[in-house]
Amino acid sequence: MASNSDIPERPAQLRRGDYGAPSTADLRSPCPIVNALANHGYIPRDGRNVRSGEMYAAMAELGASCTVRATLTFGSYYEHHDQLEGGFWDFIRNPLTYVLGPFGLRDVNQRDSEGVKCLNLNQLARHDAVEHDVSLSRRDHAQGDNCTSQKDLVATIVSSSTDSRYVSTTDFAALRVHRLQQQKQDNPSLNVGRTHLLTTSGQVAFLQTLFGGGFPRYRVPVSYMKALFEEERLPVREGWSKRVWISVGFLESLIQTQVLRRCIKRILRDEGLEYPR
Ligand code: HEM
């Protein structure tokens, strides 16, 4: 696990877009991409009181479409409510909270000093809201720290490329299967199922569509993966720039999610395994 002393102090004069590793006082999340947005100053570098408008605008720097940005922001800035008890009547009284409450990340009434909805980045680690077991770069909640990037897991991610140049859809799928098998051994209270397969595939597919060089292969260069996961930095120096001809939308990411999901299932089947239900 990375200790605070591994993290350098952030230089004082950084402009929006400049990369700076976080200081020991900054808050970070289990999401490498959101952390990269903070490390480039597209959202507050200290990771505190991040406004929903700031998160929405920052995701434009990745080339994500307005609809994707609005949906991700609206969902994650929803107030968190654990599963409501009243069933049917709760649903009738407040259908949106009934559906979105368990996935929301914001505390009830959490706003900044000017009354604007905000989040601290470490709140993204709220377990079983969006954060789930079997991440690629983080350990599970039951193992004690589900937020900090783990050097050994990141090393496995960057070495997952079979041709040493690109991480392909098949490489990503094999990596997910490997992590699943690893966590089955390491975490006796593992919590995975069909929704898990969908969410984890969706996260990786979204990464592939933003950084993977376009339809239909979405191969992410190993150098980009190193920047994103080792330093939580956008791979601009390595040659990446956000897509401008058309932003990355839901349909494209959903299609790639399906492709990845099928590939994961095929690898499991070939190995005589099944995705846990
Ligand atoms: C904008 C583009 C985004 C991309 C491409 C992206 C991609 C990813 C990826 C690939 C992971 C998995 C990391 C791993 O398994 O180690 C992840 C994790 C996560 N992301 Fe994002 N993300 C994005 C935005 C967001 C936003 C806006 C939020 C919420 C504010 C968010 C919340 C999370 C959380 C909570 C996790 C942890 C899930 C886990 O347990 O692994 N992400 N994201």
Image: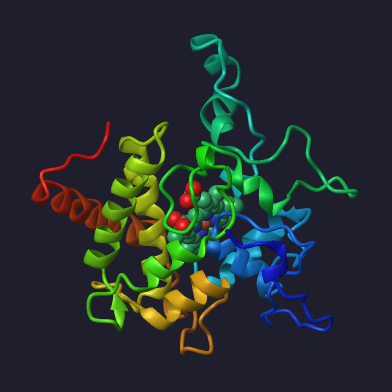
> Which residue is rendered at x = 72% and y = 68% of the image?
5
From the viewer's side, name the closer residue of 37 and 99. 37
Residue 27 shows in the view = yes
> Which residue is rendered at x = 59% and y = 52% of the image?
147
The image shows residue 152 at horizontal and vertical percentages of: 45, 64
Residue 230 relative to residue 115: left or right:
left
Give the quadrant of residue 53. bottom right
From the viewer's side, name the closer residue of 239 and 255. 239
The image shows residue 251 at horizontal and vertical percentages of: 34, 57
Give the quadrant of residue 80. top right
> Which residue is rendered at x = 35% and y = 60% of the image?
205
- Where is 229 relative to 148, above or below? below
- Where is 94 relative to 23, above or below? above
The image shows residue 132 at horizontal and vertical percentages of: 47, 42
> Which residue is rendered at x = 62% and y = 55% of the image?
29
The image shows residue 87 at horizontal and vertical percentages of: 50, 12
